[in-house]
Image: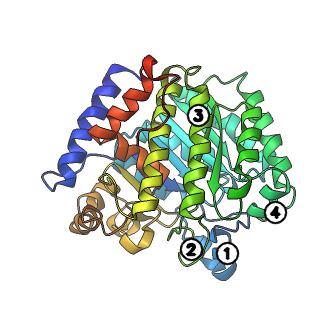
């Protein structure tokens, strides 16, 4: 990260803290998530997005077109982290064109694409094309592609609801690692959602992920999200099981922290703080530190609804971009947006959503001290908890 970007982030953090107190208007968010489609081939036990178009097939026609997405991006300004979401993003045929529009208007430093790994060849072809597009605009821009990794062998297939999915994950990871020989700005990740369906097999999952030697491996708890249409489903592990799971992930990160350098090491330090934070949120059922959803982060669904986060979704929508002439700032600075931020500031919600929690840590002085403690050489070999 260059000096100017670092200074810009610090300036925005100060703005976000003042915005949360109602003292100023929010700057452009650092973290922007766009769900490009709700189409999905998976049949996950913890998510019902795949069922939307079975029940409402005509709703597919409401997804934002490429022209509409361009208008949205053009109105936003620069961001830092661009997170593509779905459904499965690679089912969107114009995904590379969407990324190019992001390069032109949003100018992110990091682009992140998760995938269920069911369309292996298409994902590899689009990733190669996307990387070439990104390189033509900014050779420092990083792309991370993160296949879901919710079990080993049949466990993964059962959790994801598709036979043969695990083998496709392995094929995709191998293909992405091969692409790295041509694209230095590609990072290969894995992501595990800890649910009641796989929590008992986590030691095996973590050990197998380590053997795959990817650039990053992250985890978070299965949550009831308006986005996933699973609000009433029982999917999460018990508090005790979740705490034990996070200790396993912390150890896996800690054991390799001294080998990491630069951004990778900083990211893992954030991850260690996040694991402790998420356990506390689940245990205490409240915001342990202030949440900046709808301030530092924003989520736009496939139909143009602007959310503070995917957990609250349409229950706290700020409005639909189509009704505001695709002008993001009109919604971002609206009275409805202020009401949503007040709802969050009053702690009427809580969750350990990883994407948002990292931003909350960044905006919290106490938690940033914990991050820096993990980065100190003297810490290596010491205790692995900030509790």
Residue 162 circle label: 4
Residue closest to the far bottom: 55
Marks 2/4: CA–CA distance: 19 Å
Check contact, mark 1 vs mark 3: CB within 8 A: no
Sequence-first disc among 2 and 4:
4
Check contact, mark 1 vs mark 2: CB within 8 A: yes
Q: Nearer the viewer, mark 1 or mark 2?
A: 2
Residue annotated with mark 2? 229
- Circle 2 Cα neighbour tier, 10 Å, few/some/many (<14 / 14–19 / ≥20): some
Residue drawn 72% across and 46% down?
203
Residue annotated with mark 3? 253
Which quadrant would the C terminus be assigned to in this image? top left
Residue annotated with mark 1? 51
Sequence-first disc among 1 and 3:
1
Sequence-first disc among 1 and 2:
1
Residue drawn 49% across and 38% down?
272
Q: In the visual, does 206 lie left or right of 152? A: left
Q: In the visual, does 57 lie left or right of 76? A: right
């Amino acid at each position: 990260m260059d000096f100017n970007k670092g200074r810009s982030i610090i300036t925005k953090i100060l703005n976000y803290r003042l915005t949360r107190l109602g003292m100023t208007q929010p700057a452009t968010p650092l973290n922007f998530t766009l769900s490009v489609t709700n189409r999905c081939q998976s049949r996950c036990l913890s998510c019902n997005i795949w069922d939307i178009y079975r029940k409402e097939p005509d709703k597919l026609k409401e997804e934002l077109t490429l022209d509409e997405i361009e208008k949205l991006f053009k109105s936003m300004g620069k961001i830092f982290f661009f997170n593509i979401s779905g459904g499965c993003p690679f089912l969107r045929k114009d995904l590379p064109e969407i990324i190019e529009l992001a390069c032109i208007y949003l100018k992110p430093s990091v682009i992140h694409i998760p995938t269920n790994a069911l369309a292996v060849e298409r994902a590899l072809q689009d990733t190669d094309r996307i990387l070439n597009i990104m390189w033509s605009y900014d050779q420092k821009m990083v792309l991370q592609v993160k296949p879901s990794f919710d079990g080993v062998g049949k466990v993964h297939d059962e959790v994801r609801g598709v036979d043969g999915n695990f083998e496709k994950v392995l094929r995709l990871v191998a293909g992405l690692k091969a692409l790295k020989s041509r694209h230095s700005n590609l990072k290969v990740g894995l992501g595990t959602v800890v649910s009641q369906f796989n929590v008992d097999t986590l030691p095996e999952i973590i050990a197998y992920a380590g053997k795959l030697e990817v650039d990053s491996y992250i985890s978070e708890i299965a949550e009831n999200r308006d986005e996933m249409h699973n609000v009433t489903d029982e999917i999460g592990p018990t508090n005790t099981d979740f705490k034990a799971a996070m200790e396993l992930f912390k150890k896996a990160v800690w054991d390799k922290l001294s080998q990491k350098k630069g951004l990778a090491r900083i990211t893992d330090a954030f991850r260690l703080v996040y694991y402790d934070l998420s356990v506390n949120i689940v245990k205490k059922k409240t915001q342990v530190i202030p949440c900046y959803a709808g301030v530092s982060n924003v989520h736009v669904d496939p139909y143009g609804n602007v959310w503070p986060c995917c957990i609250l979704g349409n229950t706290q929508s700020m409005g639909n971009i189509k009704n505001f002439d695709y002008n993001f700032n009109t919604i971002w600075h609206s009275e409805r947006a202020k009401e949503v931020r007040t709802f969050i500031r009053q702690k009427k919600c809580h969750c350990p959503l990883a994407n948002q929690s990292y931003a909350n840590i960044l905006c919290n002085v106490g938690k940033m001290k914990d991050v820096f403690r993990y980065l100190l050489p003297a810490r290596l070999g010491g205790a692995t908890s900030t509790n």
